[in-house]
Amino acid sequence: MMILAALIIQAGAEEVSNAPAEKTKVEQFLKKIVESQGGGRIVIDQWRPSPIPGLWEVHYFMDVMGKRKPGVVYMAGDKLILGQIIDTATEKNLTVGIIGQPTKIVYGIEDFDLEGRIPRGGPSASLTLIEFSDFQCPFCKQLHETLTTLMAKYPGKVRLYYKHLPLTNMHPLAHSMALATECAREQKAEAFWTLHDDFFARQETGGDSGILAARLKSWAAQNGLNGNQLVDCVQERKTDKRVAADMRDAHTLGITSTPVVIANGEFIGGAQPLEKYERFLNPEAPAAPSSVPSPPPAQPPAVPPAR
């Protein structure tokens, strides 16, 4: 005898005559659940019959904080079932037995919105870094210094893409500073990295927008840009679409803190030391211990509260 301990959820009004046709519906529902808890990427892996006749077993994985968390839900008719199948004859939990353990994720560059981004470094570099950062984050400044050293030590071998993740609940000017670098890029492509470096070299930890505007005008005058145009662009949030795209990427991948780097597809969280990146360029370099604790493993989805 088998017991299905589950919560049944209405997933639609159509009968499941062909399981793959329901893939998008289930994927969208699971994504909604995960997004209600802060983000993560959901991918349906496979459909197959469950031990209970008429019940589909839907395998998926959820990407959160550099870990791939596998999971299983069940589909019967127009109902999506979150639960576990227990065989009372053997007292085994059949669902837990088929889920497996979390594994590390390898990301592809196609997983990120890099449209219009100007990378720093060699176009044929052997190490590609995609950095999620915040201009007012002290650990991001520390990582900036590390990556600057890395690129100077291995010229032409490292390519860096910068993506914005301003943590506005802690850093009141971070979003405006992100907008400013993109506004500077609109005037002069290379100005993005120039202002990026200036923000980290003279990191602003306060929240005075007037001081930021004055700083931008002064910086623009020194770098051949129109200061009034730069400040107006920030105040009118003209580059918000680009910053929002970066934040959306972070949300999709479950990234909620800074800094985070995706190094040749590998998730690296925190301001890690130089050796953490050198191992990609010099396999014989000794591995460095992490300077920050690893993120906790992702939890399985829970149903969002009814509204």
Image (cartoon, rainbow, N blue to C red):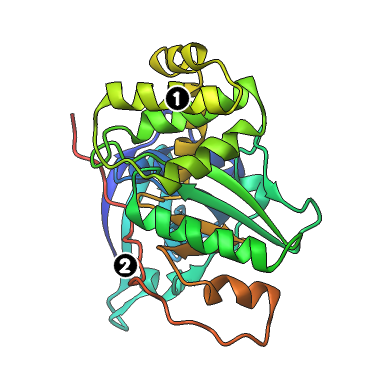
Q: In this view, does 292 lie above or below 216?
A: below
- Closer to the camera: disc 1 or disc 2? 1
Q: Position of residue 162 (x, y in %)?
A: 56, 45
Circle 2 is placed at which residue position? 296
Q: Who is closer to the viewer here, 71 or 209? A: 209
Residues at marks 1 and 2 touching, judged by CB atoms closer than 8 Å? no
User: Within 10 angstroms of label 1, few (less than 14), some, or many (20 or more) residues?
Assistant: some
The number of numbered discs placed on residues in the rendered structure image is: 2
Query: Is residue 237 visible in the rendered structure shown here?
Result: yes
Circle 1: residue type: Ser
Q: Is residue 104 above or below residue 128?
A: below
**Who's the residue at 53% across and 74% down the image?**
276
Pick whichever of labels 1 and 2 is earlier in the sequence. 1
Circle 1 is placed at which residue position? 218
Q: Position of residue 180 (x, y in %)?
A: 47, 27
Circle 2: residue type: Pro
Q: In which quarter of the image is residue 206?
A: top left
Q: Who is closer to the viewer here, 302 or 296? A: 296
Q: Who is closer to the viewer here, 139 or 92? A: 139
Label 2 SS: loop
Query: Is residue 65 visible in the rendered structure shown here?
Result: no
Q: How far apart are marks 1 and 2 (CA)?
A: 43 Å
Is the C terminus in the top left, top right, bottom left or bottom right quadrant? top left
**Who's the residue at 76% across and 59% down the image?**
156
Label 1 SS: helix
